[in-house]
Amino acid sequence: MWQIVEATHNEYALIVYDNLQIELKRMRAYTRRPDMIEKAVHYHEMIANAIANRDSHNAKMLMESHLQNNSELAMYELAVLSTSKQD
């Protein structure tokens, strides 16, 4: 992913990417399940293929779907963790 951001030669994109890494590391703590890793790899491959094919519409759609799915999973895992700590 870093190579894609770096290839943009966009200083703002580089800064945003660096800042995003902090948040992603926190989210990954809640999505590090084998089934989710396999799903993420599949999404990443599809996104990379769409970019390679210059299909910006599909790349955007896949990225948004990937982020939404991860966000929902992280929220679910946090809720489960919170409930288990209350017991």
Image (cartoon, rainbow, N blue to C red):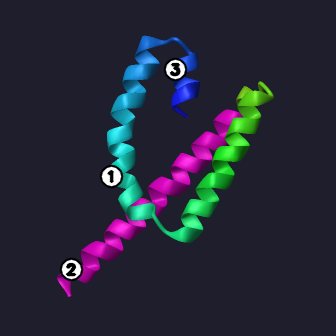
Identify the residue at horizontal 52%, vertical 20% (top origin): 6
Q: Is residue 18 above or below residue 37?
A: above
Q: What's under tag 3, amino acid-wise?
A: Glu
Residue shown at 58% from the left, 49% from the top: 66
Marks 3 and 1 in Cβ contact (< 8 Å)? no
Q: Are marks 3 and 2 in contact (CB under 8 Å)?
A: no
Q: Quadrant of the N terminus?
A: top right
Q: Is residue 24 above or below residue 30?
A: above
Residue 43: horizontal and vertical position, in percent?
66, 50
Disc 1 residue type (three-letter)? Arg
Main secondary structure of the magenta stretch: helix
Q: Is residue 87 above or below residue 18?
A: below
Q: Residues within 10 Å of mark 1 (few under 14, many from 20)?
A: few
Pointer 1: what residue? Answer: 26
Q: Which mark is residue 6?
A: 3
Of residues 72 and 14, the one nearer the viewer is 14
Front: mark 2 or 1: 1
